[in-house]
Image: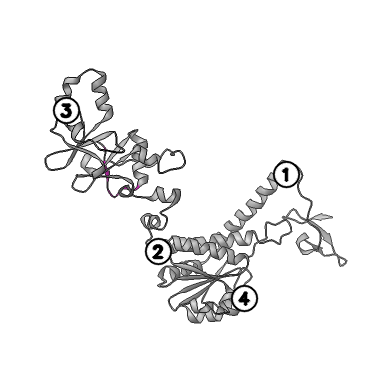
Amino acid sequence: MKADSGSGLPRRLTKEGVALPAAARNTTSLSAPTTPLERLRAIRQFVSAEAEAILACSSQLSSAAVQAAEMTAKCDGCVVVTGVGKAGLIGQKLVATLGSTGNPAHFLHPAEAAHGDLGRIRSGDVVWALSNSGRSEEVVRIAPHLREHSSGLIAITANEDNPLAAAADLVVTLGAHDEACPNRLAPTCSTAVMMAVGDGIAMLASQLRGFTSQDFARFHPGGALGRKLASVAQIMRPLDQCRLADAKMSIRDAMVTSSKAGRRSGAVMLVDSAGRFTGLFTDSDLSRILEQRDEHSLDEPISSRMTRDPIAAQVDWSLQEAMAVFSHHRISELPVIDDEHSPVGLVDITDLVSLTDQPREKSTLPFQQPKSFK
């Protein structure tokens, strides 16, 4: 028995002397690896095979993929994705990708389409039809109707020599790829490639539509991702829940007049006569006075002990930017100001702790102090 060059699979000679790869023979599967190391190597080989297939496809993609992204970005209706079997499951994932990155999308099951669901296609829609072979009967049967009733039918398939490609307005070819399956049968590399190309087209379409991280946040309000993309305005304590005082007041009067019921932050934001934010006095500042037995200074202006021109966030900052400031400067309170330099709220470190289920990762974002405090 000889090895199949390049595949690692054994070959067997037919009566005519022609060597057939294992995938072409009706034989039992190759023996499974027995040791933990062999099994780990096997998984790594399967994953590597898919990665190599994606890279190979990436290098041969043509301008058709760009045209598909352009058609998708210009779509005034929905992107309708259809496919059957594994391609259908990939299509449903791509619908989720498109919908979350600026292109309204829905999935159309080809079998259901033939029984009335073709009415869901509108003239402004763009259709993505997925089929690696391009010969899936259910998809090929409805392809002419999809093209007729939409603004364009894009076929995503292995090559242009198949019925689906012939029926489409545009064909994005994926190429032929050996499957990672030991028997070279189960769709693995071909499905990985289809997923990657669909994602790539969706990402370029998103860029062409000018989709921003703020837009992304609107579609992801829940979970860790939503919290990461939230704005400071969404999570700050509003001004009526913050401790605020005139900088000319004594420390004693400022602490009394700024008292708030319920949860309290460890800082008093101080303003001048025009209501502009000028300083911050924290519980730590008060503790130092008491530790030094300097009680007489409690009747001095709080401006004499406040932190002048402290770090402050702009109201349009993202939560991620605010977290970078907390991490970089090791602070516990972050005042929030508007364009007029008036305080509008405050973010306390405890507010951030309550927003995450996992420990905060150290941020690598560069800190940029608001221009008004440079």
Task: Report the amino acid beneath label 2.
Answer: Leu
Which segment did they paint magenta?
311-318
The numbered dot on residue 38 is 1
Residue topped by disc 4: 138
Residue visible at 45% across and 74% down? 125
Residue topped by disc 3: 304
Q: In which quarter of the image is residue 292?
A: top left
* Distance CA(mark 1)–CA(mark 2): 46 Å
Q: Tell me if mark 3 has few (under 14), some (14-19) or many (20+) residues whose alpha carbon lies within 10 angstroms of its own.
A: few
Task: Report the amino acid beneath label 1.
Answer: Glu
Q: Is residue 122 above or below residue 38?
A: below
**SS at badge 2:** helix
Q: Tell me if mark 4 has few (under 14), some (14-19) or many (20+) residues whose alpha carbon lies within 10 angstroms of its own.
A: some
* Distance CA(mark 4)–CA(mark 3): 79 Å
Query: Which of 104/371 is in front?
Result: 104
Residue 230 visible: yes
**SS at badge 1:** helix
In this view, the mark in front (4 or 3): 3
Would you say the residues marked 1 and 3 are in contact, meaning their CB atoms lie under 8 Å apart? no
Residue topped by disc 2: 208
Residue 88: where, in percent of width, then height? 58, 67
